[in-house]
Image: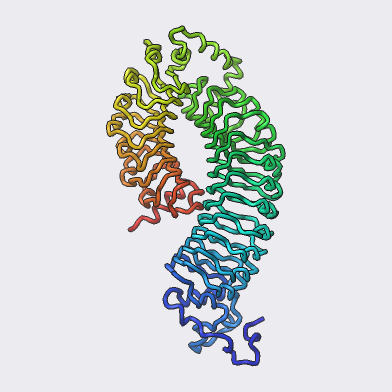
Amino acid sequence: MSRMKLVAGLDPRAGFKAGGRDCGTSVPQGLLKAARKSGQLNLSGRNLSEVPQCVWRINVDIPEEANQNLSFGATERWWEQTDLTKLIISNNKLQSLTDDLRLLPALTVLDIHDNQLTSLPSAIRELANLQKLNISHNKLKILPEEITNLRNLKCLYLQHNELICISEGFEQLSSLEDLDLSNNRLTTVPASFSSLSSLVRLNLSSNQLKSLPAEINRMKRLKHLDCNSNLLETIPPELAAMESLELLYLRRNKLRFLPEFPSCSLLKELHVGENQIEMLEAEHLKHLNSILVLDLRDNKLKSVPDEIILLHSLERLDLSNNDISSLPYSLGNLHLKFLALEGNPLRTIRREIINKGTQEVLKYLQSKIKDDGPSQRDSATETAMTLPSESRVNIHAIITLKMLDYSDKQATLIPDEVFDAVKSNIITSVNFSKNQICEIPKRMVELKETVSDVNLSFNKLSSISLELCMLQKLTFLDLRNNFLNSLPEEMELLVRLQTINLSFNRFKMLPEVLYRIFTLETILISNNQVGSVDPQKMKMMENLTTLDLQNNDLLQIPPELGNCVNLRTLLLDGNPFRVPRAAILMKGTAAILEYLRDRIPT
């Protein structure tokens, strides 16, 4: 029905105000005119501290053109304008919205992300047609109950607010399919939540949840559940009955056991890295018929069961940074595209094989099956045949693998007998991880002519001594999970160093000396407190292809980092910066670098 008929019998302008008078320069008239035709108005990034009245009244007031006595053709009759259905006012400085919001009852999309809103007007209940509401990156502490009236709402984005609880009646949003509550302050999820029976995607990551309600299994359509970065110690067994579940993220929690998934036959990705899981058993694996990605990195696994071969569809398996000393040879029969094993005390596979990548490791494991070679048990027997005075030293590893291994002993010092056992043997690899050592053993300098690989992770090192800087053949150095906050300038003597792992330490900035080690290909410095990087110096590091800065304190990413075109992997998740957005980060390194380059001031 045309707007002229609505006011039949009256002056054509009765009930309308003259439009455009209170918009100033903040909203160009051309934009409003186009919005009346298209039903869509985008006012993002205009530095608005409030929404001009002409926006709320766009479908109520007479447009400016009509007041200028302009003649209207058939295509421009303002009284037949299109109701506004999509309003984007993101990336502004709005602190509140008025109840005039009710003047736009036809809205199906309202995007107000990245403002400074602390509350929403109660009039939001009148947007009965609303299907998508984005209020992310604001300062909301509570949600108004009126939001539960939006029965047609399908997508609700509330991430990066300050929510401490979920409103009563939330379960009435029966059409909701996509809900993002990540990066808030939630400590519980109410059981009534499970009544959101249409929900397909639920993101609860980066909150303070200690448990999930058992009733979650009622979400029969849920395909994507993200509970990363919480405080979960257990998962309700009922979750295993969620038969539509395809993606499950449980990284960075406090899980000690992996749940079984008897009904999750569609589960394609299971991410349980950075927990405290100690055991992987056949029961955990046998129902995962569709699994493509299994992420078990940074746990406490000591072994992998032979039943891993049951995962016929598996493409990506991440076992890095566990306590695994041997692998079942049957793993070689899987058609893996990616297998990560770094940071394990593997004794049955030499590092040079691991360094050659997934396919070489699989070939090696397959060859062991074909050769029907010595089993891992034989190796263990051989290892045990040591001289009494060297009973704690792995002689087999020294002779066969050229490895000096004194790991997982909780020792505060490395005994002299460990170094004495080397004798005239060539040592290329040192593993003193998972001890309690507070300083680098001075006798390590004895190995400077041959050692290329040193693992000192999971110790109590607070500084690096010059002994380490003299290992000039060093290519791989693992120092993660210590108490380090700086590196000595003398480390630039490590002229062959390619990979350094500094994750889970106390660095507040990227150590200056790293910029001067031009052979570096990989820098892993996640889970520290790094607040800045120098893009100009980093650009000079032409060999650097991997930079992991996840979970640090970066408030902004310098656009000039986009000039580091040699980077193939740049990981930035878990930092407090606002741009680039998560959507850009998800597209991968090339997209991030391009985004940054586009923002370099000219």
Residue 27, horizontal then vertical, whole percent: 46, 74
Q: Which residue shows up at 56% across the image and 66% down it?
A: 110
Residue 239, horizontal then vertical, whole percent: 67, 42
Query: Does residue 254 lie above or below 383 as drawn?
Result: below
Color theme of the render: rainbow
Residue 310, horizontal then vertical, whole percent: 67, 30
Query: Does residue 278 lie above or below 592 as drawn?
Result: above
- Would residue 448 be visible to someone looking at this image? no
Q: Which residue shows up at 46% across the image and 78% down it?
A: 23
Is 566 displayed left or right of 86 in the figure?
A: left
Of 395 and 496, the residue lying toward us = 395
> Picture quarter containing residue 10?
bottom right
Q: Quadrant of the N terminus?
A: bottom right
- Would residue 516 be visible to someone looking at this image? yes
Residue 131, horizontal then vertical, whole percent: 63, 63
Of 256 and 476, the residue lying toward us = 256
Of 512 and 194, the residue lying toward us = 194
Q: Which residue shows up at 51% across the image and 56% down it?
A: 162
Q: How many marks?
A: 0
Query: Does residue 4 lie above or below 308 as drawn?
Result: below
Q: Quadrant of the C terminus?
A: bottom left
Of 516 and 275, the residue lying toward us = 275
Query: Does residue 341 lie above or below 377 as drawn?
Result: below
